[in-house]
């Protein structure tokens, strides 16, 4: 039987997440198209959410208690899949920041720095177990507040959150063995600022090593995804973590700025954009505060002719589409060796036309909602720049839900190194595809970016992997897989992707002074 023409049509740039007109070629959100053109629909399979208790209003968590903000102001947290308001979140000002830092200082001086490591470890184990107990509820909340699929929050984020607390709990009484011949000391109060793409996981990456090392913390989640951090605060209360050891202050950029500029902070750990990271570097210069930065990236995924192509395409898809492209280490540039270019493009085109975009709480959804209107606008603006600069966009024709913020899985061909879409972080489900002829050219192209966070290599030859990896300027390189994380393994970048490592033994070092 002759194969039908591929369902992929020419580009449609969605300035607004408007549904495309319903017609025979357009898929409904729960429909899937098989490669040979047949369509069939999945029955909805939503994760239950009616038992989730979302408070109408969330307050600041300071000194072990929830308290109203000094200004009395609150802002709305939105469900990006429905545009409905989920809750009101307290907005912390400099006064609240000061209260939080003071509480952390007292807790460090009087309790946490004096406590034996094995006792600190017990609290971390308790937190890890409580996270596991509440994992399903936290995963649903994470998907509702941030738009990520339940598949991701339930199967990746929450297990990793618990794993980080378990892992660093194990180090709490072994710090002296971690750095042989040296005497480790905690630094004091750690100010920790995190982004919206992995709200709970980023909180765990920051809090677990800091607490294991004997520091106390003031954490600021991102404005659009604060709710799960405040449920984590409830877990800290249940674990009877001493008051003030962790304080959580919510708010936008100015709240983060006030925290960074507070005189009594010893360490700043930031994950977010390179532009804010640069501002923090300036703010910290000339002070005694120590700083680690986990910033943006523009990772290259390199497919060689000898790679297992189906496996590679699946890895590419999971590396950029399954998380809405909301990952700093997303493989957002695809470098394909010329001999397999048309095969890879065909497979990629077929695969993205089978991806399901829609309700993040549906267990069959592959691509959830874009985190915010602002982020959707950024994606649209960059996609438009790609079209204007002459690249060609491939997008499956699918009908997006009427409400909420959505972007279909897309890729660009005809991209040159000078295009903005080859240089700037899109932070959405959009891939820029380029070609190369020789390994030398692949390395040169992969390194042609101001970032240096991550990269991927797909080849059948182990020796080629070692050769290429040693020359890629990226903090993390995956080979024949992508986006794999483990608490024992350090993660971080260099150049404009920041400095310092999180995870593993390396992740303890920024929270300790060594005599
Ligand atoms: P962002 O604007 O830099 O925000 C990150 C955090 O900083 C948020 O909590 C934000 O608060 C806060 N903030 C904003 N302005 C600030 C200021 N002047 N002083 C102190 N804090 C301030 O980044 P984003 O756009 O939300 O997040 C996406 C970026 O994070 C991407 O570039 C991505 O690559 C990067 N990222 C990197 C990693 C990594 O490990 N390398 C991991 C995840 C994400 P509000 O949200 O309230 O504005
Ligand atoms: Mg939200």
Image (cartoon, grey):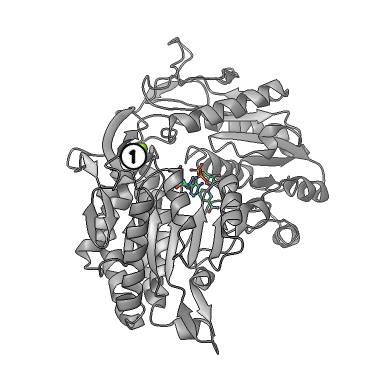
The residue positioned 73% from the left and 28% from the top of the image is 414
Against 335, residue 262 (above or below) is below
Name the secondary structure under disc 1. Answer: helix
Crowd tier of the residue under label 1, counting other residues whose Cα lies within 10 Å: few below 14, some 14–19, many 20 or above: many
| Left or right position of 204 against 6 | left
**Displayed quadrant of residue 52:** top left
Left/right of residue 323 with respect to residue 219 in the rendered view = right
102 sits to left or right of 296: left
Can I make out residue 490 in this image?
Answer: no
Q: In which quarter of the image is the N terminus?
A: top right
The one of 273 and 439 positioned closer to us in this rendering:
273
Q: Is mark 1 within 8 Å of ligand 2?
A: yes
Which quarter holds ligand 2? top left
Q: In which quarter of the image is the C terminus?
A: bottom right
> Relative to 159, is 108 above or below?
below
Q: Which residue is drawn at 36% across and 30% down?
A: 81
Residue, x 49% and y 60% (percent of image)?
269
In this rendered view, identify the residue nearer to me: 511 or 504: 511
* Residue drawn where x is 48% and y is 37% of the image: 324
Q: Find residue 399 and report its horizontal and vertical position in percent.
A: 43, 19
Find residue 443 and report its horizontal and vertical position in percent.
77, 50
Q: Name the residue under label 1.
A: 145
């Amino acid at each position: 039987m002759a194969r039908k023409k591929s369902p992929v049509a020419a580009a449609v740039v969605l300035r607004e997440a408007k549904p495309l007109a319903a017609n025979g070629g357009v898929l409904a959100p729960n429909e899937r198209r098989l490669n040979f053109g047949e369509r069939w629909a999945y029955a909805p399979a939503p994760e239950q959410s009616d038992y989730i208790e979302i408070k109408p209003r969330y307050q600041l968590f300071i000194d072990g208690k929830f308290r109203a903000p000094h200004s009395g102001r609150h802002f709305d947290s939105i469900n990006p899949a429905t545009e409905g308001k989920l809750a009101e979140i307290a907005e912390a000002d400099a006064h609240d920041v000061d209260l939080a830092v003071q509480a952390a200082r007292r807790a460090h001086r009087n309790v946490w720095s004096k406590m034996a490591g094995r006792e600190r470890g017990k609290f971390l184990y308790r937190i890890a177990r409580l996270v596991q107990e509440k994992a399903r509820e936290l995963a649903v909340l994470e998907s509702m507040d941030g738009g990520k699929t339940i598949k991701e929050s339930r199967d990746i984020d929450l297990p990793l959150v618990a794993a980080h607390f378990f892992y660093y709990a194990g180090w709490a009484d072994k710090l002296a063995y971690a750095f042989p011949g040296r005497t480790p000391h905690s630094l004091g109060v750690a100010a920790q600022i995190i982004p919206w793409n992995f709200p709970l996981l980023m909180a765990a990456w920051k809090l677990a090593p800091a607490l294991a090392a004997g520091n106390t913390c003031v954490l600021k989640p991102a404005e659009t995804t604060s709710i799960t951090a405040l449920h984590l605060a409830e877990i800290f209360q249940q674990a009877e973590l001493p008051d003030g050891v962790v304080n959580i202050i919510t708010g936008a950029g100015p709240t983060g700025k006030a925290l960074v500029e507070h005189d009594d902070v010893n360490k700043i750990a930031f994950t977010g954009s390179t532009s804010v990271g640069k501002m923090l570097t300036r703010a910290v210069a000339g002070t005694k505060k120590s700083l680690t930065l986990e910033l943006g990236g523009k990772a290259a995924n390199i497919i060689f002719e000898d790679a297992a192509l189906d496996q590679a395409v699946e890895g590419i898809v999971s590396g950029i589409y399954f998380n809405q492209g909301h990952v700093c280490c997303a493989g957002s540039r695809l470098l394909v060796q010329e001999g397999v270019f048309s095969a890879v493009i065909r497979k990629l085109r077929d695969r993205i036309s089978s991806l399901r975009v829609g309700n993040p709480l549906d267990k069959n959804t592959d691509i959830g909602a874009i985190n915010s209107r602002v982020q959707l606008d950024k994606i649209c603006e960059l996609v438009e720049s790609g079209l204007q600069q002459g690249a060609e966009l491939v997008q499956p024709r699918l009908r997006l839900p009427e409400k909420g913020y959505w972007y279909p899985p897309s890729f660009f061909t005809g991209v040159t190194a000078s295009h903005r879409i080859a240089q700037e972080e899109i932070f959405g489900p959009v891939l820029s595809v380029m070609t190369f002829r020789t390994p030398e050219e692949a390395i040169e192209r992969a390194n042609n970016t101001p970032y240096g966070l991550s990269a991927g290599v797909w080849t059948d030859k182990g020796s080629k992997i070692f050769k290429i990896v040693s020359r890629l300027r990226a903090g993390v390189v995956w080979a024949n897989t992508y986006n794999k994380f483990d608490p024992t393994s350090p993660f971080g970048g260099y150049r404009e992707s920041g400095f310092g490592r999180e995870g593993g033994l390396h992740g303890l070092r920024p929270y300790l002074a060594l005599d």
